[in-house]
Image: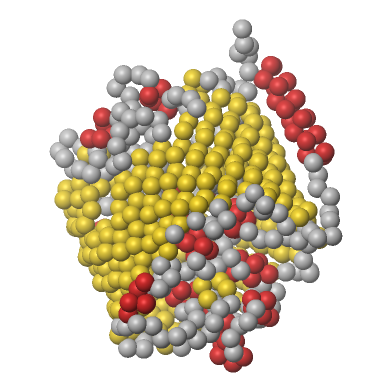
């Protein structure tokens, strides 16, 4: 009979596994070769972009990543790319874009991307990211007819993914549980490649759902005379700093990479996010050289929990319809929206106003709990804001101030960035979101996902103190005046972080990061200490080896983690192989650890674990010689040594093992 006293037996097994893991690490340590070269890939960008435990389950990050992946697969011609096109890259500042265009104007077309490295504001980190999204093409494209503009360069992409769990949750085996099977499946089609035409559709089925109940489509026209963009179907809209309307929520920036420019208007809905988008039609027009106008309409049905009187208590964001109670909440309230944006720009100055009016088919009544008293109440809501920006050679300043009719609240965000040396950059960001302010479509920078009941100050410094060294540090201080969930008074906190990178050789990179974060929870203030040490080796262009050590301490409770990942390309077989193995040992949920796995096509794979266990994963990707076909598969396993039951409720897994497989197919023509 298997022992049930926890660590006595399982600890011995875990120590044995860790010893074998360390032995594997020592035996497989790569040897530096003369042809070694550190190559920055799309996978490296995804890992760096999503390397934030606070957003590991935020679907907005995956939506933003999907848009960036399309830009990676269809890079921009640096010699013809417009300001708006380059502003789609979140790491590129308006000052850098201005210098790129000035260099092209003064010195002619960029023939090699290495020339960008000579720009004063272009640091190594930004330059290597930029290489993933641009190329040096012809500076003067020939004049095209309308038909050629719409159809030239058209590409079709069809992708499908299926996740197959090798276990059963309680909801699939008990009466009145989940109605559907445990498979996850999604399909997506996209027409892209043209600067003037884009279209696509998507369908998705979550585990436990009976049918494909998530769907959407869009068609977008762009850069046709005075019409800048026109989109019909599902889309996103973001203007200014995102206080009134933010296209992708907090995915637009993080504390280590805060927003470097304002949001850029309309975007088609290309991700599988089920809640954060508009459905209807929108168009933006150029009114002369300095003005632009955008009109927005939307009507869609939402999921909501209702009280006994039929009032909306909570607008749901999960998108799950597995049980009878979840299906009762499916699309039981509708929301109609009309709004617009008027923008002006001249030289380095920008300004604009954004506003919308939204009406629900049922009145919102969030309840009498203390933390819910600041939630929006009623059927009709209006929000309006003014944004402003100034950009010069060394300084950028921007901000936005907004007002909401719901409870008559105000919000403002202001930021400034100073390039005080070629190798040093400083940023300060101030924000104030009144507890009376609320916008259903906000997406500005903040500690929380909703821009409400928060004020704060962020200070950030980035630079290169020595050759091949990079320093990144920030300090964020925030305050919540109204009591949050499970609290009876206002709360405050601070988040301090420092990161140092050393490119000791072209093939070896060492990184160290420490984060201190103190925040109030139901049991009082908790101080989190997180440390990450990482060594990345590139013994060959087609091979990367990475070792990561994690430590998380919370009020005397410790969490340790060790992860080893390897990636290898086999060009003659057109294969890419990924392997990862992580071991974790924590004293509880508070000191949980987040591990990153190489993801499948157009997805993020970061998960948190606590307790004692091990997580191996393997993936393989094959691409045809003409790049028209791509097939991939992934296997991930989690073995806990301190428990025999995982999760709770209908999500319960009766056993210490959790094994998943995924299969993906991408066809391009």
Residue 193 percent coordinates (x, y): 43, 67
Residue 483 percent coordinates (x, y): 40, 46
The residue under the point 63% across, 18% down is 6
Left or right of 227: which side holds 261?
Answer: right
Residue 412 percent coordinates (x, y): 40, 67
The C terminus - image quarter:
bottom left
Q: Residue furthest top?
A: 1
* 462 vs 508, nearest the viewer: 508
Q: Residue furthest bottom?
A: 106
Left or right of 445: which side holds 354?
Answer: left
The residue under the point 33% across, 24% down is 177
The residue under the point 58% across, 86% down is 109
Q: Is residue 591 something that shows in the picture?
A: no
Quick check: 207 above or below 542? above
Left or right of 328: which side holds 374?
Answer: right
Left or right of 551: which side holds 629?
Answer: left
Residue 186 percent coordinates (x, y): 39, 44
Identify the image's colour scheme: rainbow, by chain, secondary structure or one colour: secondary structure
* 414 vs 12, nearest the viewer: 12
In this rendering, the count of numbered labels is: 0
* 466 vs 652, nearest the viewer: 652
The N terminus - image quarter:
top right
Residue 224 in which image quadrant: bottom left
Q: Is residue 133 something that shows in the picture?
A: yes
The residue under the point 34% across, 47% down is 203
């Amino acid at each position: 009979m298997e022992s049930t006293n926890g660590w006595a037996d399982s600890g011995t097994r875990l120590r044995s596994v860790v010893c074998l893991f360390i032995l594997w690490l020592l035996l497989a340590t790569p040897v530096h070769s003369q042809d070694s070269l550190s190559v920055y890939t799309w996978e490296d960008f995804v890992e760096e972009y999503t390397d934030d435990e606070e957003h590991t389950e935020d679907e907005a990050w995956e939506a933003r990543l999907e848009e960036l992946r399309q830009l990676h697969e269809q890079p921009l011609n640096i010699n013809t790319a417009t300001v708006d096109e380059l502003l789609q890259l979140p790491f590129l500042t308006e000052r850098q874009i201005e210098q790129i265009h000035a260099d092209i104007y003064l010195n002619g077309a960029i023939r090699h991307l290495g020339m960008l490295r000579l720009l004063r504001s272009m640091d190594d980190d930004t330059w290597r990211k930029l290489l993933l999204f641009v190329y040096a093409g012809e500076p003067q494209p020939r004049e095209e007819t309308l038909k050629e503009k719409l159809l030239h360069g058209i590409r079709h992409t069809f992708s499908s993914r299926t996740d197959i769990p090798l276990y059963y949750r309680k909801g699939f085996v008990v009466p009145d549980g989940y109605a559907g099977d445990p498979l996850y499946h999604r399909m997506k089609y996209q027409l892209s490649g043209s600067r003037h035409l884009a279209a696509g559709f998507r369908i998705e089925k979550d585990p436990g759902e009976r049918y494909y109940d998530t769907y959407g489509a869009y068609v977008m026209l762009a850069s046709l005379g005075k019409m800048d963009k026109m989109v019909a179907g599902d889309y996103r809209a973001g203007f200014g700093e995102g206080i009134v309307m933010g296209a992708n929520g907090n995915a637009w920036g993080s504390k280590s990479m805060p927003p470097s420019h304002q949001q850029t208007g309309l975007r088609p809905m290309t991700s599988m996010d089920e809640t954060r988008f508009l459905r209807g039609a929108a168009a933006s027009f150029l009114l002369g050289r300095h003005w632009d106008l955008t009109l927005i309409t939307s009507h869609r049905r939402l999921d909501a929990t209702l009280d006994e009187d039929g009032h909306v208590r909570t607008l749901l964001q999960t998108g799950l319809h597995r049980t009878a109670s979840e299906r009762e909440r499916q699309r039981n309230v509708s929301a109609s929206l009309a709004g617009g944006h008027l923008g002006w720009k001249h030289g380095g100055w920008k300004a604009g106003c954004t506003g919308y009016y939204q009406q629900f088919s049922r009145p919102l009544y969030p309840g009498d709990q203390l933390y819910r008293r600041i939630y929006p109440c009623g059927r009709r809501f209006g929000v309006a804001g003014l944004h402003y920006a100034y950009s010069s050679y060394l300084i950028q300043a921007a901000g936005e101030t907004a007002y909401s009719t719901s409870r008559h609240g105000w919000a403002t965000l202001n930021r400034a960035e100073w390039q005080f040396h070629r190798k040093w950059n400083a940023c300060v960001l101030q924000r104030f979101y009144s507890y009376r302010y609320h916008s259903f479509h906000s997406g500005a920078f903040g500690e929380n996902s909703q821009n409400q009941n928060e004020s704060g100050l962020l200070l950030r410094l980035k630079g290169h103190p020595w050759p091949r060294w990079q320093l990144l540090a920030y300090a964020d201080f925030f305050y919540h005046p109204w009591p949050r969930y499970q609290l009876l008074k206002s709360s405050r906190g601070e988040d301090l972080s420092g990161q140092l990178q050393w490119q000791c050789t072209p093939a070896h990179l060492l990184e160290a990061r420490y984060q201190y974060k103190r925040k109030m929870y139901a049991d009082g203030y908790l101080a989190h200490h997180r440390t990450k040490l990482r060594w990345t080796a590139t013994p060959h262009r087609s091979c990367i080896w990475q070792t990561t050590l994690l430590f998380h301490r919370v009020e005397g409770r410790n969490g340790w983690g060790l992860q080893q990942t390897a990636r290898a390309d086999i060009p003659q077989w057109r294969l890419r192989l990924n392997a990862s193995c992580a071991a974790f040992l924590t004293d509880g949920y508070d000191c949980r650890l987040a591990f990153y796995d190489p993801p499948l096509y157009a997805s993020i794979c970061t998960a948190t674990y606590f307790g004692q266990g091990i997580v191996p994963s393997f993936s393989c990707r094959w691409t045809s010689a003409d790049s028209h076909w791509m097939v991939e598969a992934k296997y991930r396993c989690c073995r806990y040594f301190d428990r025999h039951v995982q999760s709770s409720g209908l999500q319960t897994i009766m056993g210490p093992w959790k094994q998943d497989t995924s299969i993906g197919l991408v066809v391009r023509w």
